[in-house]
Image (tube, rainbow, N blue to C red):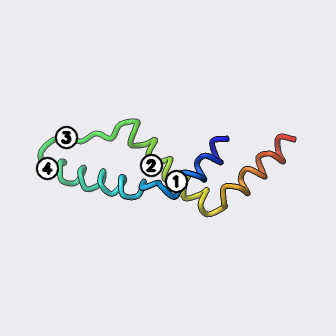
Amino acid sequence: SCIRLLEHLRSWSMLEVYMLGILVSIVKLSGMLDVHPGLGLWALAMQSVLLILISHNGTFSLCDSYEERRS
């Protein structure tokens, strides 16, 4: 499932570095032009929040609780 794939790829994730780069770019560019966060930035922020929740609770415990609810 997607959650198991996410668990496998989590060690390669550099989402924090990407978000820091976006933040620095917004701060630097805001003096020169108008910066409007689009849908992609909000989706990336939500993905960051979900990854924090998954890392706190554990991916496999989420999978197990989901499978228990389905049956």
Q: Which residue is drawn at 30% across and 50% down?
A: 22
* Residue lying at 33% horizontally and 41% vertically, measured from the top left: 37
Within the image, what quadrant is residue 20 found in? Answer: bottom left
Total marks in image: 4
Q: Mark 3 points at which residue?
A: 34
Query: Which residue of the protein is positioned furthest toward the top in this rendering?
Result: 39
Label 1, label 4: how many angstroms apart (C-alpha)? 28 Å
Disc 4 from disc 2: Cα separation: 23 Å
Q: Please name the amino acid that badge 3 sits on.
A: Asp
Instruction: Say left or right for 55 vs 63.
Output: left
State if disc 4 and disc 1 touch (CB < 8 Å). no
Q: How crowded is mark 2: few (under 14 residues within 10 Å), some or many (20 or more)?
A: some
> Which element type, helix, strand or loop, lies under badge 2?
helix
**Which residue is labeled 1 in the image?**
49
Quickly name the residue at label 4: 31
Asked whether 17 or 69 is in front, the reply is 17
Tell me which amino acid carries mark 2.
Ala
Q: Tell which circle, 4 or 2, labels the residue nearer the N-terminal end.
A: 4
**Labels 3 & 1 near each other (Cβ < 8 A):** no
Report how far apart the C-alphas of labels 3 and 4 lie in the structure: 8 Å
Q: Residues within 10 Å of mark 3 (few under 14, many from 20)?
A: few
Question: Which x, y percent locates residue 61?
Answer: 73, 57
- Mark nearest the camera among 3 and 2 is 2
Vertical placement of 38 versus 44: above or below? Answer: above
Left or right side of 7 for 28: left
Of the residues shown, which amino acid type is indicated by label 4? Answer: Gly
